[in-house]
Image (cartoon, rainbow, N blue to C red):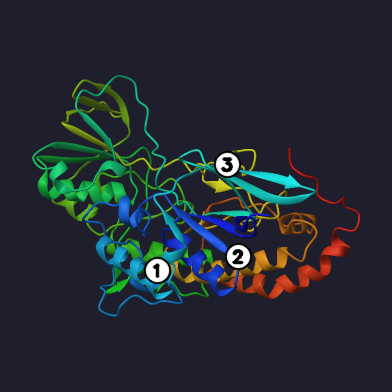
Amino acid sequence: MSPTEEQFALVGAGPIGLCVARALAQHGIPYVQFEASNAVGGNWRDGVYETAHIISSRKTTEFSDYPMPASYPDFPSGTQMLAYLQDYARHYDLEPRIAFGTTVRDARPVFDSGVERWELTFGDGERRVYKGVIACVGHHWDRRWPSYPGTFGGELIHSKDYKTPEQLRGKRVLVIGGGNSACDIASEAARVAASAHLSTRRGYWFLPKTLFGVPLVELIPPWAPLWLQRLGLRAALAVAVGNYGRYGLQRPDHAIFEHHPTINSELLHYVKHGRITPHPDVARYDGDVVEFADGVRERFDLVVAATGFHQTIPFLAADLVPVDGPIVKLYGSMMSDRFRNMYVFGWSQARYGFGPIVSPGADLLAEVILAQVRMRHPLGAVLKKMGAKLPRTHLVDPHAAMRAIRHARKRLPLLLKLEPVVMRNEREPAPAA
């Protein structure tokens, strides 16, 4: 048996991967970490534009086990976020176990006398076998492009490719999308471009970053049920923002938090100052002219598609991890009912601020891995047999998630005891094809 066959392969060294690495190390679980980039940070190193700031607050983004510096503002910059993640990795001495510049191309289960292990294929073609695999690869890499009739004759880029305001300067700019990146880029265009336009295919909830001088997300009490959160925000928006129609924007077609809200204090400001012109969805391209669904036609030099990302795990095939749109169909959003040693972590998206749930969630994952060693069946299969449901959304309320994590950690020892009873009539799990 090679030494790697007793290690977990942890893929990704962004915020989520670093937190999982800390938990594995503290729980004494052998692992090695792989990162395609040459340093830690994930999207905060390679994927954000130079003017980016977080949309959740410092207090709701920092890891619960490692607070951000008190000198940081309420909304740290991308540069500050990267420095924080680098400090986190140094504090926990994580970098010696990270293989930088290493791409995992494929991971597949292999069975020897019924023992499950995982064979990884790397970018250079090398193959190695590990005890298991943990995917922490993040969401923001597989670009999703809009499709419209015709051809745009100017420059067309994805928001992933936007890095600096110089790309917008002096140009007639159209941003397609209504999410956080779209509104950030449109606001930047309002400052430096010849003209700035925003096209949205539906109505969005545009929430200010602060209310009453406090980050909006910190005003939501942890005990408040979702209906009360929505009621409170609707009342606050009625006073602070008013009717979106008065800004030329479409009325939201969904309840707050059914989709990710857009947290931006600049968009409505620039719309009211005439620096951003809102439009409905694009109907077609016609050279450098874009025609919108209401028949309006405008000329543009640059179109930025801030249309999000496909949610894919590049090295785990669809037959191993079913993904339905943005939702990973695993128990607890991380465990398979077919495999003992395969986990996907960090796929669910907190409605605001991931930090407080990632640290205890990573500790729960480590405890699950240790419990799994003592079980005959995949823990996901036990949960399935007990009536657990697969997730129906990728969005989670952070406060509800923290309560669920605390409950799961208390419940885990009981599941060990219940497995023989729950799985009494189930056959020993067979190797997957």
Tell whether 123 sits left or right of 112: left
Residue at 46% of width from left, 39% of height from top? Answer: 124
Q: Quadrant of residue 141?
A: top left
Looking at this view, is 222 or 337 the one in front?
A: 337
Tell whether 420 sits left or right of 342: right
Tell whether 154 sits left or right of 404: left
The answer, for residue 243, to whether it is visible in the render is: no
Residue at disc 1, secondary structure:
helix
- Residue corresponding to mark 1: 89
Q: CA distance from mark 1 to mark 2?
A: 19 Å
From the viewer's perspective, is residue 301 above or below residue 277? above
Query: Residue lying farthest right?
Result: 425
Where in the figure is residue 310, as x and y percent of width and height? 45, 40
At label 2, the amino acid type is Leu
Where in the figure is residue 84, as x and y percent of width and height? 33, 69
Q: CA distance from mark 1 to mark 3?
A: 33 Å
Closer to the chain start, of discs 2 and 3, is 3
Q: Are marks 2 and 3 in contact (CB under 8 Å)?
A: no
- Residue corresponding to mark 3: 324
The answer, for residue 148, to whether it is visible in the render is: yes
Tell whether 61 sits left or right of 129: left
Closer to the chain start, of discs 1 and 2, is 1
Q: Which mark is residue 365?
A: 2
At label 3, the amino acid type is Asp
Other-residue count near label 1 (Cα within 10 Å), few / some / many at <14 / 14–19 / ≥20:
many
Residue at 71% of width from left, 72% of height from top? Answer: 411
